[in-house]
Image: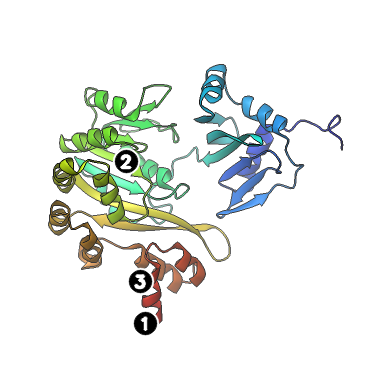
Amino acid sequence: MNSETKQPIDIKKLLKSVLHFNSSDLHLVPGSEPQIRIDKSLKPLNLPVLTAKEVEEMAYALIVDKQKKIFEDKNELDFSFELEDIGRFRANYYRTIAGIACAFRMIPIEIPPLAKFNNNPIFKELVKKEKGLILVTGPTGSGKSTTLASMLHEINLTKSKHIITIEDPVEFIHTNIKSLFSQREVGANTESFATALKFALRQDPDVILIGEMRDKETIEAALTAAETGHIVFATLHTNSAPSTINRIIDVFDAGEQSQVRAQLASSLISVVSQSLMPKIGGGVVATQEVLITNPAIQNLIREDKIHQIYSQMQLNQNETSMTTQNDQLLTLLRKNIITKETAIASSNRPEEFLRVLSNL
């Protein structure tokens, strides 16, 4: 079929295919056929190769003039949207040497309960806290947003709280059940995470969700909110609990780090480091490394002995409810849920994991 008779591609039909194939993402890149991600792997949709003009037309069909201007000025655009009878999506537009490219992430319209994905039972206890900082970390695509949405949903089901979310973009849409939600999108409803956090403290919140702690100003505001009687949920792109603490401290100058360690020691409740990996036979499964702050952990943070936290996480796990990623990987391997190769490739401490395997 030549370019003169080629039928235009309907972007909504392509997005519907994400739902149809139970996939997580859709990618549109000039010079390639549309591809979707199923169980962590990209699969072509067996459609014609896309031209730069086709991708641009599909991209612009989903956004308004204000968004077009932002994209044309910055060559990047993050936003979310909902299509009736299809679902909700997070989108990112970016420019390549071949033209505009797009990545779409499927967001479930119904927020899953905490029990659905075999989340750690400790999560139901964490959301009962009245103040402090809870971090959910992991790489892009590890399910951080879903876990946080489920935790907020649990609060919504059980408590009458004012919950402010600050996101870029807003992903899950919460319906008021027992709690009252004020959801704000950076760019559309507020200038930045830091600005929104500054004013959030004047908006009588009980719970604050920060979509991402990207910079020093946002981290400072989050620590202040957590210290002053609010429960704060936030995300970081780190792959383990100890590295998360280091990342926060390292954002600050050397002269400020002692104070930040003291703030973290007093306000940090938990770090959940999450990753997704393919299961044997199809589908994906999550591992969740869980750090729960206790007096021993608090002392290690204050004394700048972050490297000793991992050893502390391995002690008395039945009593502390802590678990490491390697513990979780071994459990999944013993249950024949994942392959040995997947476990080794996914481990954030592969040398230790191989040593444990050799002793089994």
Residue 158 visible in the snapshot: no
| Quadrant containing the N terminus in the rendered view | top right
Q: Is residue 334 left or right of residue 59?
A: left
Q: Which residue is mark 2?
A: 234
Separation of disc 1 and disc 3 at Cα? 11 Å
Observer-side mark, 2 or 3, equals 3
* Residue sitting at the far bottom: 359
Closer to the chain start, of discs 1 and 3, is 3
- Callouts 1 and 3 close, C-beta under 8 Å: no
Identified by mark 3, the residue type is Glu
Q: Which residue is at the front of the view, 182 or 200? A: 200
Q: Which residue is at the front of the view, 264 or 46? A: 264
Closer to the chain start, of discs 2 and 3, is 2
* Residue sitting at the far front: 254
Q: Is residue 349 left or right of residue 242?
A: right
Identified by mark 2, the residue type is Ala
Circle on res. 359: 1
Closer to the chain start, of discs 1 and 2, is 2
Circle on res. 352: 3
Residue sitting at x 41%, y 66%: 329
Residue sitting at x 51%, y 57%: 284
| Quadrant containing the C terminus in the rendered view | bottom left
